[in-house]
Image (cartoon, rainbow, N blue to C red):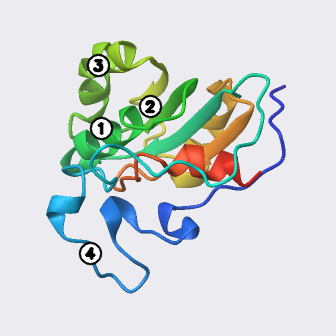
Amino acid sequence: NHEHKEGWWGSSSDVGQGACGEGQDGSRAPSDELMPGLGCPRGGPAEPTEARPLVSAPLVSVIVPCHNAARWLDECLASVRAQTHRPLELSLWDDSSSDGSASMVEAARSLFQEAGVSLAFGGGSSSLGPLGCGAAKNRAVRQSSGEYLCFLDADDTMRCDRVAAQLHVL
C-alpha cells in the first residue's frame, strides 16, 4: 500500500510554460536564450524570488507511462535527467511496447545513475498485450517511492526547473 502526499501535477503547460520554453500561445523564446532542448535559460533556471526554508528536500517521482514511444523517449528521458531538483526518481512502466522503448530505458540506466536520479522500471511484454495508459500510470505509481508525484507522458518533455518550481508553490 503506497501513500503519497495529496497533490496533482499535470503537464508542463500547467505552470505557464510549454515543453522546451514555449509560451501558452505556442510562441518560443529565441533559441540563444535557452539551453538546447531543455527550455531553461542558459545558466539554469531563475532563482525563486522568496526563499522558503526546507528541512530536507522531498523525493519526487516522475511517473511516465510508455507504449511504443521510442521516437520521443530519448528527449523525454533527457528532460527528466536535466531536472534541477534532487532527490528525484523516474518511475516508468512499459505497457507492452514493440518498438524498442524498453531497451532504450535500460540503455539509459547508467545516465540516470550519473545524474543522481533513481530509476524504477517495470513492465515489458505481457500475454494480455497493452493494458492502456491508465493501467500503466497506476503501475508506475505503485512502483514509485516519492513523497510527491509528477506526471509526464513519454512523448513530452519538461523544462529543467519544472519540479523545483512546482515544489516551490506547495
| Amino acid type, mark 3 | Leu
Secondary structure at numbered mark 3: helix
Tag 1 residue: 78
Q: Which mark is residue 126?
A: 2
Estimate the x, y position of residue 56 in percent, counting from the top left: 74, 22
Q: Are marks 2 and 3 in contact (CB under 8 Å)?
A: no
Q: Closest to the observer: 34 or 15?
A: 34
Is residue 151 visible to the viewer in this orientation of the structure? no
| Viewer-side label of 1, 2 | 1
Q: Amino acid at mark 2?
A: Ser
Q: Is residue 64 above or below residue 57?
A: below
Of labels 1 and 2, earlier in sequence is: 1
Reading the image, the residue beneath label 3 is 111
Q: Residue at x 71, y 38 (%)?
A: 148
Q: Amino acid at mark 1?
A: Ala
* 57, 81: nearer the viewer: 57
Which mark is on residue 28?
4
| Residue at the far bottom in the pictured view | 25
Q: Earlier in the sequence, mark 1 or mark 4?
A: 4
User: Disc 1 and disc 3: Cα gap in Å?
Assistant: 9 Å
Position of residue 94 measured from the top left corner of the image (x, y, whole percent) = 42, 35
What residue sits 46% from the left and 52% below the top? 46
Ranked by sequence position, the earlier of labels 1 and 3 is: 1
Of all residues, the one furthest to the left in this rendering is: 32
